[in-house]
């Protein structure tokens, strides 16, 4: 029985991997300086919640087969230092996922946007078809108890992001996964605290392509000119499969998509989701799922949590929550709702929550991102700026960055609630976009506007 210890076990995916390995029969232990819900309850339920919080070098023993290091752990972590002294095998999260999947067919979904949804579509189609597979995805999905599964299955489907793997391994996570089948959804600069220039950011995708095995399959979004250029320069050694927006129609708020002779209605919508669906279908073909079976499965795909999640609707109003935060995602999400409901007013509320979005120098990247909304609101938390030790934002800087003088700028939760209460929702949709929570807003209370 393998014996594994997690340093910073309370992370959103770290604790899920710990649970997956426990279910596989491994002996699992872990530590952290603080653990919050849902990780706290999930770990406790499986009997692997640390007995006490804090770092203890005594947790690190010579009989450990692997030490898995989370992003939350710093380079001077005493347990990490003990593991290094003992010469133990130390893995970042993605490096360990690769160790567990060396003998599997690895499908990796990378790109600046659409990773979670595309991965989720592939997972849904595999599940509906009865195919055995493992997975790693960054959101809660209907029909899946966990967001990480590691078993003896012959296939693994992973969302692969660009963030550094750990405190001692700064390479992006997706560089460790070495896919036989890869999807790249597009390249749009974000994470300026990690990638200070766009050239530096683009290079991470070039490296990913460059290090794929000769003859591996690269499925890529040919509508993205930046990605197209990288593929032309770097992917001569690969089997390249481009994809684009498929034939579709929108009728009374329902999008239907057509491939060959097959036309099916979908529960998701928007050009970005149609791109995601096309990519997922091409990947599923490589896994033995045909076009008709894939499209049949997509009729019941509701999307991942917080990805164009429908909070509620009636005959004249729909309220959506979406994870969009980077400029390209915001623009695509607003466009999708406007196209789906062309006769309705759109009230769009974006929370600036990430380091990049709260940086005044990055604000110009949002130019025209909210132009298509009838009423556009930007919310940011003064408290979040204090925690991140960043200077306060000038509303004029935000309006200038977005290029919209009528932009409503709010930085207190009570003021946001008051603004939403004052709006008229007849023949109107409300779109809430954030990777955060608007300082703890209960999204279910928004149903009162219906």
Image: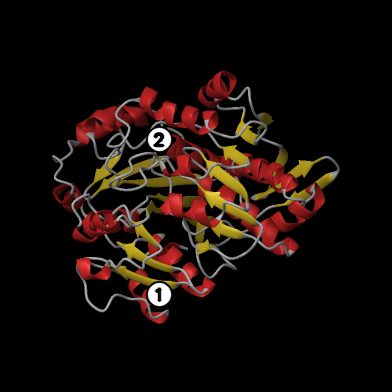
Nearer the viewer's eye, disc 2 or disc 1?
Answer: 1
Instruction: Report the front residue among 445 and 382.
Output: 382
Residue 418 at what x, y percent from top left? 27, 57
Question: Residue at horizontal 42%, vertical 79%?
Answer: 46
Gap between marks 2 and 1, in whole Å? Answer: 34 Å
Residue 282: quarter of image: top right
391 w.r.t. 152: above or below: above
Instruction: Report the front residue among 409 and 175.
Output: 175
Dot 2 alpha-carbon crowd within 10 angstroms: few under 14, some 14 to 19, many 20 or more: many
Left/right of residue 406 with respect to residue 239 in the rendered view = left
Residue 89 at what x, y percent from top left? 37, 55
Residue 42 is tagged as 1
Secondary structure under the numbered disc 2 in the rendered image: helix
71 w.r.t. 370: above or below: below
Residue position marked by numbered label 2 in the rendering: 327
Q: How many marks?
A: 2
What colouring method underlies this structural image?
secondary structure
325 w.r.t. 366: above or below: below
Question: Residue at horizontal 54%, vertical 42%?
Answer: 178
Instruction: Report the front residue among 449 and 379.
Output: 379
Secondary structure under the numbered disc 1 in the rendered image: helix
Please indicate, yes or no, whether residue 396 appears anywhere in the rendered image.
yes
Mark 2 and mark 1 residues within 8 Å of each other at the beta carbon: no
């Amino acid at each position: 029985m393998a014996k594994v210890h997690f340093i910073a076990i309370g992370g959103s995916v770290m604790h899920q991997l710990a649970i997956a390995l426990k279910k596989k029969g491994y002996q699992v232990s872990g530590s952290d300086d603080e653990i919050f819900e849902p990780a706290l309850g999930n770990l406790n339920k499986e009997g692997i919640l640390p007995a006490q919080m804090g770092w203890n070098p005594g947790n690190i023993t010579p009989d450990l087969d692997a030490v898995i290091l989370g992003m939350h752990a710093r380079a001077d972590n005493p347990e990490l230092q003990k593991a290094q002294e003992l010469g133990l095998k130390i893995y970042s999260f993605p490096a360990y996922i690769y160790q567990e999947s060396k003998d599997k067919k690895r499908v990796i979904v990378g790109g600046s946007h659409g990773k979670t949804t595309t991965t989720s579509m592939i997972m849904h189609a595999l599940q509906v078809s009865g195919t055995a597979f493992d997975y790693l995805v960054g959101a809660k999905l209907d029909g899946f108890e966990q967001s990480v599964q590691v078993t003896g299955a012959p296939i693994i489907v992973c969302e692969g992001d660009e963030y550094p793997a750990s405190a001692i391994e700064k390479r992006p996570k997706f560089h460790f996964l070495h896919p036989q089948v890869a999807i790249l959804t597009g390249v749009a600069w974000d994470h300026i605290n990690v990638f200070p220039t766009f050239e530096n950011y683009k290079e991470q995708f070039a490296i990913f392509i460059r290090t794929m095995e000769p003859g591996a399959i690269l499925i890529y979004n040919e509508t993205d000119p930046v990605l197209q250029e990288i593929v032309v320069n770097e992917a001569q050694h690969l089997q390249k499969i481009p994809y684009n927006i498929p034939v579709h129609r929108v009728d009374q708020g329902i999008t239907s998509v057509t491939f060959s002779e097959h036309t099916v209605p979908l529960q998701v919508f928007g050009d970005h989701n149609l791109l995601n669906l096309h990519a997922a279908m091409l990947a599923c073909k490589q896994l033995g799922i045909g076009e008709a079976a894939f499209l049949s499965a997509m009729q019941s795909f509701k999307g991942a949590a917080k990805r164009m999640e429908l909070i509620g609707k009636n005959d004249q109003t729909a309220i959506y929550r979406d994870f969009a935060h980077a400029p390209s995602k915001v623009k695509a999400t607003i466009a999708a709702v406007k196209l789906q409901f062309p006769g309705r007013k759109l009230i769009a509320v974006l929370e600036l929550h990430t380091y990049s979005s709260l940086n005044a120098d990055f604000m110009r990247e949002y130019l025209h991102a909210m132009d298509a909304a009838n009423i556009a609101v930007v919310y940011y938390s003064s408290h979040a700026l204090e925690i991140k030790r960043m200077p306060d934002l000038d509303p004029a800087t935000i309006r200038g960055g977005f290029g919209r003088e009528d932009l409503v700028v709010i930085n207190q939760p009570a003021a946001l609630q008051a603004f939403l209460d004052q709006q008229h929702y007849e023949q109107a949709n409300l779109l809430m976009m954030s990777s955060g929570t608007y300082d703890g807003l209960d999204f279910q209370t928004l149903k009162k506007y219906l």
